[in-house]
Image: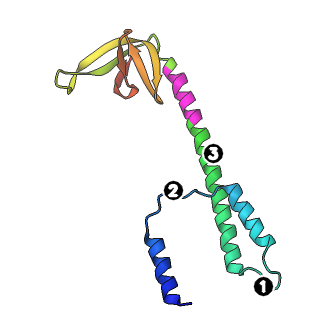
Amino acid sequence: MDLSALNNATLASSSAPKAAPQKTVGKDEFLRLFVTQLKFQDPLSPMDSTGFTTQLAQFSSLEQLTNLNDGMKSLLLSQNSLQNALSASLIGKQVGFQGKDASGGAGAMQYGTVTGITFDADKTWFVVDGATKIAPGVIKEIR
């Protein structure tokens, strides 16, 4: 068989765009593949120790990143709960916030009483005097 024809066919097929997205391998799949590879290796010609060490390091990195991601999710939920609890403490308090003028620029300071809180798409909005919705970042004064 002519190897140059095989190489040309391989290059042509690998340069074609792939339509299907690649699936990422999770921690469990990686460990299953690794154990299967060890199970079926030739005992007279075991895997190269460098390759074995590299795969173990990759698995360890994957596990640590997964644990870090889980910890960050937990921290974010905790932070959101704390923010919601602190926001509730402003109900009934008078706040001062920067208003907007007709052109959308910074206007005069306005004051009003926080009558409620709404949560919309992971954002907190204070309802002032039953009508005006303001973001926490625009509050300049609390009385």
Looking at the image, is mark 3 or mark 1 nearer the viewer?
A: 1
Disc 2/disc 3 C-alpha distance (Å): 25 Å
Q: Is residue 11 visible?
A: yes
Quote the CA–CA distance across marks 3 and 1. 39 Å
- The amino acid type of the residue labelled 2 equals Pro
What residue is pinned by disc 3? 70
Which residue is denoted by mark 1 in the rendering?
Answer: 45
Q: Indicate whether residue 79 is drawn in magenta.
A: yes
Pick whichever, 75 or 44, lies toward us: 44
- Looking at numbered disc 3 in the image, what kind of residue is underneath it? Asp
Q: Is residue 100 left or right of residue 112?
A: left
Left or right of 123, for residue 53: right
**Segment tinted magenta in the rendering:** 77-87
Please identify the quarter of the rendering in which residue 33 is found. Answer: bottom right
Tell me which numbered mark, 2 or 1, is placed earlier along the sequence.
2
Residue displayed at 54% across by 58% down: 22
